[in-house]
Image (cartoon, rainbow, N blue to C red):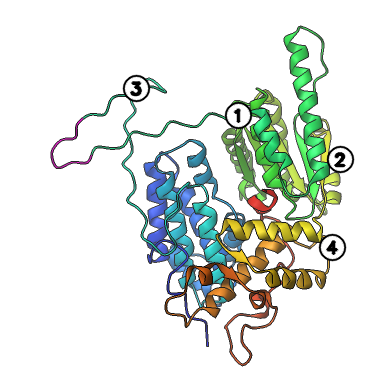
Amino acid sequence: MSPSRPSSPPGTGTRTLEDAVDAVALLATTAGGDGATARVEALALAAAVAESAPQAAADWAVAAGGGSTQDFFDAASRGRRWREAPTATLRRLADQQSPHTTAYAQALAEVASAACDLGEPTVRVMGNASVAAAAQLSVVRSAPPAGGAPPAAKAPVATAGLTPGIRTAPTEAAPGTVAPEPEPAAPPAKTLDELLAELDALIGLHNVKREIHRQVALLRVEKLRVSAGLKSPTITRHLVFTGNPGTGKTTVARLVGGIYQALGLLTGGHLVEVDRSELVAGYLGQTATKTAEVVALAVGGVLFIDEAYSLTASGPGGDQYGQESVDTLVKEMEDRRDDLVVIVAGYPAPMAAFIGANPGLASRFRTTIEFEDYTDDELVEILQHVAQGADYELEAAAVERFREVLGRTARGSSFGNGRYARNALDAAIGHHAWRLRDTAAPTIEQLRLLVARDFDEEPLEEGVDTGAAASDRVPAPGPPNPDASPPDPEGTP
């Protein structure tokens, strides 16, 4: 039999996926964003949560208003990054201190919950949904209790005509109405020292930290020399990140944006993360426009291109679409060199070939930072950190069981590193929900505690078919998806 769904879904409600996606799109539009983009992100998040569920593609297509099985798996490929970190639209709202941030995060948690209804549920889907909901709610300082109703969304505050940073005295509300709460003041931007402290606190990544500190020193002195009227060589700010999947490249790229802003080299410091599918269009001529639009969004911050070598030519005749994107990117980097940093990332050998094959790229990407694989101790630390972030506690035996499974896992370019630890936690959370399926009123300790058998590779109980395929058991990192970014909190202390 298939596993029953947990009595309290990991999201914040019980909407259908179609309704949940509509709510996300409406909130994005209300917040001044692009509703169509928000809809695509929400559908990708749902596909990433439910991708292991049999028959999920057909149900997803209904909610999406059409689409093939390939469309479903393409969406899941794009959405895996948001199973582990806030979506691009949500992060943008949070960075802008939008009053709609909380409601939007809760709406995305609804999407993760609704994805449990796609196809036949498995314990892996339950785990995915729980962690994805927590990832979206992580931007909210005070998330609602698990399974509880979300608080009412605050009304947007009218700010037209007000001087920035000046609060007006509260006015008395008309009878029968609720006065809107004043918009909270945006927190001050982080200082360079604070950002470097965050970098230094990341798990592992010793060589990366040393190189980023070196870059900061070079750029700081260059700026001081220019201010003093001295001659100074032009130092290229664009970077190449090489390493296997799940080694923290996106996390560090986001910090680089903030660091460069603190140095006065960027006006915004935000991160725009894309892959080939978001740069290349279906026809020649359209790709240049699509790439230029993405670059325009990144101006003032960092454009992070994962698996960038997928853009280069391959085989007889090459890839005209990818080459058009690269040519446009080189031009945009030159035109916007004073307020844009581009970071390209991927496996070491393909990235070396990618940079070396194009003189325009080779002259702009002179600094390569290598991200090494995590050690077993660092992976255990990552597991404990992401579990704590999702409000779970690991008993000592569970940590040892994870170490045992990790020790039997082959390492290589396909090993998921931090993503492996997160996949193990996702599966354990699903097993935990199945283990408590018959507990009518579990205690807080039972709801939080993950035990050793939650990390077993075998089904939860002998003789019971959990409905989970072999791919749903731990470990289940599999070959990493090139389009998926490394988990955002994997290197966070």
**Mark 1 or mark 2: which is in front?**
1
Label located before the other in sequence (3 or 4): 3
Left/right placement of residue 156 relative to residue 78 reads: left
The magenta stretch spans which residues? 172-178
Q: Amino acid at mark 1?
A: Gly
Image point (46%, 55%), residue name? 108
The front one of 156 and 317 is 156
Which callout, 3 or 2, points at the residue further toward the start of the chain? 3
Q: Main secondary structure of the magenta part?
A: loop
Residue located beneath label 2 in the image: 356
Left or right: residue 424 versus residue 43 is right
Q: Is 194 above or below relative to 7? A: above
Q: Amino acid at mark 3?
A: Leu
Residue located farthest toward the bottom when viewing the structure as drawn: 463
- Evaluate if marks 3 and 4 touch, with contact meaning CB atoms under 8 Å apart: no
Q: Residue at x 66, y 78 (%)?
A: 453
Reply yes or no: does residue 314 show up in magenta. Answer: no
Residue matched to label 1: 300
Could you tell me which secondary element the residue under label 3 belongs to? loop
Q: Report, in whole angstroms, how far the alpha carbon at label 3 lies from the one at label 2.
A: 52 Å
Residue 313, can we see it?
A: no
Per the image, label 4 sits on a secondary structure element best described as: loop
Q: Nearer the viewer, residue 106 or 469?
A: 106
Across and down, in percent, residue 49 comes to 55, 65
Q: Closest to the observer: 319 or 485?
A: 485
Residue 422 in sight = yes
Q: Which residue is mark 3?
A: 162
Tell me the SS state at disc 2.
Answer: helix
Is residue 176 found inside the magenta-colored segment of the image?
A: yes
Give the labeled residue for mark 4. 412
